[in-house]
Image (spheres, rainbow, N blue to C red):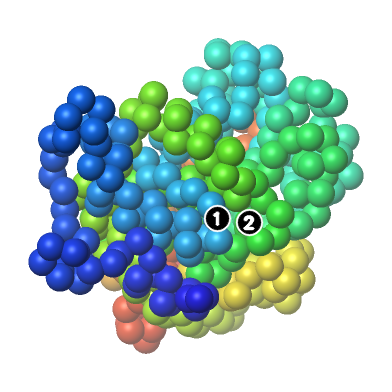
Amino acid sequence: MIEGFETLAIHAGQEADPQTGAVVPPIYAVSTYKQDGVGGLRSGYEYSRSANPTRTALEECLAAIEGGTRGLAFASGLAAEDALLRTVCRPGDHVIIPDDAYGGTYRLFAKVLERWGLHFDPVPLGDLDAVRAAVRPETTKAIWVETPTNPLLNIADIEALASIAHQADARLVVDNTFASPYLQQPLALGADVVIHSTTKYVGGHSDVVGGALVARDRDLGEELAYHQNAMGAIAGPFDAWLTLRGIKTLALRMERHCDNAERVVDLLLSHPRVIEVLYPGLASHPGHEVAAKQMRRFGGMVSFRVAGGEAEAVEICDRAQLFTLGESLGGVESLIEHPGRMTHASAAGSPLEVPSDLVRLSVGIETAGDLLADLTQALES
């Protein structure tokens, strides 16, 4: 039985093509399939919204590397989130979310699903008593977790939150985008569903937008698959192929992301213009012990705050050269951004507003010395 992560990433769902022997799954750019008589489907394929062989390969691989029973690939991470929430919740239900959730997730709850009748409360998930107090008996249907969070890199205890959720007959949902399946396995810690923006580390090359759900329970996986088909926000075959290609090198890339991030953290800690470094690998980080328990390493995302406030944070972003000023994260190239004005602008004025002096780095896999030199000049110009 194959168990190694790297082996699963390369082989799960990716048997050699039986007709040609091709070792890479083909891109099935097809919308419909010839049936062998009315209702006689070949391998279950009838229409590519319902299923496509390239997408099937990706979904099987995602399930394998996350240790789930069913993987589903979507057009974006937010499409995956929407499908999940409308599967497990009904109008009038309640969800607990992090008080520092990703801005796009907050926007989905606050601007879209709240009008649909879904209620939510932002809660500091590191405070387990606060989470327990926020649970509404018979109404709370999910506890929504990001760990590490975006962009403050807070840590939540997946195992403890799973216990709270299940005691309330709710599901624990974990957005595993920042950690990746290589660094963290939420389903093994009790989570019911894992979410990814596969645009980020899973794809890894900033060339494809996608999302994924992986369910631990087969019945829930079937419900999610029904909604995926009924709602239709599926990953196209070329997107699925690019994402599958990215997964093959995920383990190698994540090791290098972590190596470089640790070097960047050391530089930032010693710089007089930096007043705080946010990275769960630091022993001083309040979530360090939990992160060390549930993560293989601490990831490639680093945030920091600067002495000169918002103006200096923006200037640093503008001065960086090798670190590309841009949204998103998790690609092979390093990115820098000002969350308050960019990825988290939608959270301005809300309980999830981020500090204006914050800079977020997605540390890539370039030569570490070049990254350090660029950050040094950006901080000191």
Q: 22 or 291, which is in the foreground?
A: 22
Identify which residue is drawn at 19% across, 64% down. Answer: 17
Q: Name the side, left or right, on which 361 lies relative to 188.
A: left
Question: What's the mark number on residue 187?
Answer: 2
Q: 377 or 137, which is in the foreground?
A: 137
Q: What's the amino acid at mark 1?
A: Gly
Which of the 4 image quarters holds residue 245? Answer: bottom left
- 310 to 272, vertically: above or below: above
Name the residue beneath numbered marker 1.
68
**Looking at the image, is mark 2 or mark 1 nearer the viewer?**
1
Q: What's the amino acid at mark 2?
A: Leu
Find residue 120 and report its horizontal and vertical position in percent. 68, 26
Among the two numbered marks 2 and 1 on one chain, the one whose residue lies closer to the N terminus = 1
Residue that extends furthest to the front in the rendered view of this protein? 37
* Image marks 2 and 1: residues in contact by CB distance under 8 Å: yes
Which of the 4 image quarters holds residue 276? Answer: bottom right
Find residue 272 and report its horizontal and vertical position in percent. 58, 74
Find residue 152 and report its horizontal and vertical position in percent. 60, 54
In the rendered image, which quarter contains the C terminus?
bottom left
